[in-house]
Amino acid sequence: MDYQDIAADLESVLITEDEIHAKIAELARRIETDYAGEKLLLVGVLKGAVMVMADLARELHLPIEMDWMAVSSYGSGTQSSGVVRILKDLDSDLHGRKVLIVEDIIDSGLTLSWLRGNLESRGAESVEICALLRKPDAAKVIVDVKYEGFQIPNAFVVGYGLDYAEKYRNFRDIGVLAPHVYA
Ligand code: XMP
Ligand code: MG
C-alpha cells in the first residue's frame, strides 16, 4: 500500500500531526512541573502508544525510564470485554516507583482501569495516566486521566500508532476510517 493510498481510506482527518505535536508539548510541560526532581517511569501500552511514547519521552526534560506492556482486552470482536490478558509484561520492579501510563486512546476505559489497578498492586508509589485521545461517549467506567490530549467523537480512528488490522499506524495524522474499508 502506497502512503498516499492511506489518505484515500479515511473519511476525514481529525487531528493533524502539527496539532498532535503541539498538544504533546503542552502535556509535557505539565508533566515536567508535576514530576520535577523525580525519576519517572513511563509505561507504554503496545502497540498503539509507540508514537505517543516516542514523542512525549523526547519532549520531556526529565530523567525518565521507559518500559512496555502489551495487553489484550478484546475477544473476537471490536468491543472491549473488560477481561484483560497480559501478552508482554514489564521488565521493571514497580516498588516505590512513580509510574505514568502512556496510552494512545481510551475507549470504554476498561483496559486502563484494569491496568492502573494492576500496576498499583505491584507497589508503585503512584500511577497516573497520560492518554492522547479519549472517547467520552464510549465510556463504560470512569477513568481518572490526569494528562489527556483530545476528546474525540465515538468513531474508529487510525494513524499515529492507531491501527485497523495492523495498518495505518504510520499515517502521521489521526483520521476517521472510511466505512468502505471495513464494510
Ligand atoms: P478500552 O475500550 O478498554 O480499549 O478503553 C482501549 C483500546 O482499544 C483500542 N481502540 C482503538 N484502536 N482506533 C484504534 O485503532 C480506535 O478508534 C480505537 N478505540 C479503541 C486501542 O487499542 C485502545 O488501547
Ligand atoms: Mg492501545
Image (cartoon, rainbow, N blue to C red):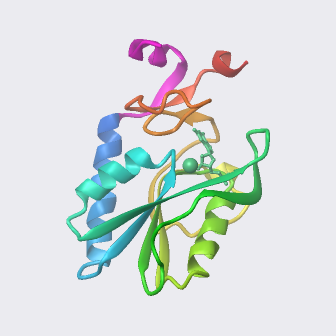
Which residue occupies the foreground of this view, 150 or 17? 17
> Which quadrant of the structure image shows residue 179?
top right
- Is 18 in front, or is 46? 46
Bounds of the magenta segment = 1-16
Residue drawn at x 37%, y 31% is 172
At which x and y percent is residue 122? 57, 81
Extreme residue in the left direction:
61
Q: Which residue lies furthest to the front in this view?
A: 91
Horizontally, residue 135 falls left or right of residue 90, namely right
- In the picture, measured across the screen, residue 74 lies left or right of residue 71, that is right
Horizontal and vertical percent position of residue 133: 50, 49
Q: Residue at x 50, y 76 (%)?
A: 127
**11 to 173, vertically: above or below:** above
Residue 32 lies, with reference to residue 46, above or below; the image says: below
Residue 125 higher or lower than 41, as above or below: below
Please say whether residue 109 is visible from this viewpoint: no
Give yes or no for residue 143 being in the magenta stretch: no
Name the residue: 25% across, 55% down.
58
Percent across and percent down for residue 181 are: 64, 18
Q: In this view, does 178 lie to the left or right of 52?
A: right
Look at 71% across and 64% down and name the residue there: 141
Q: Which quadrant of the rendered structure holds the C terminus?
A: top right
Query: In the image, 152: left or right of 142?
Result: left
Q: Does the magenta stretch include residue 15?
A: yes
* Residue 127 in view of the camera: yes
Depth order, front residue of 175/97 = 97
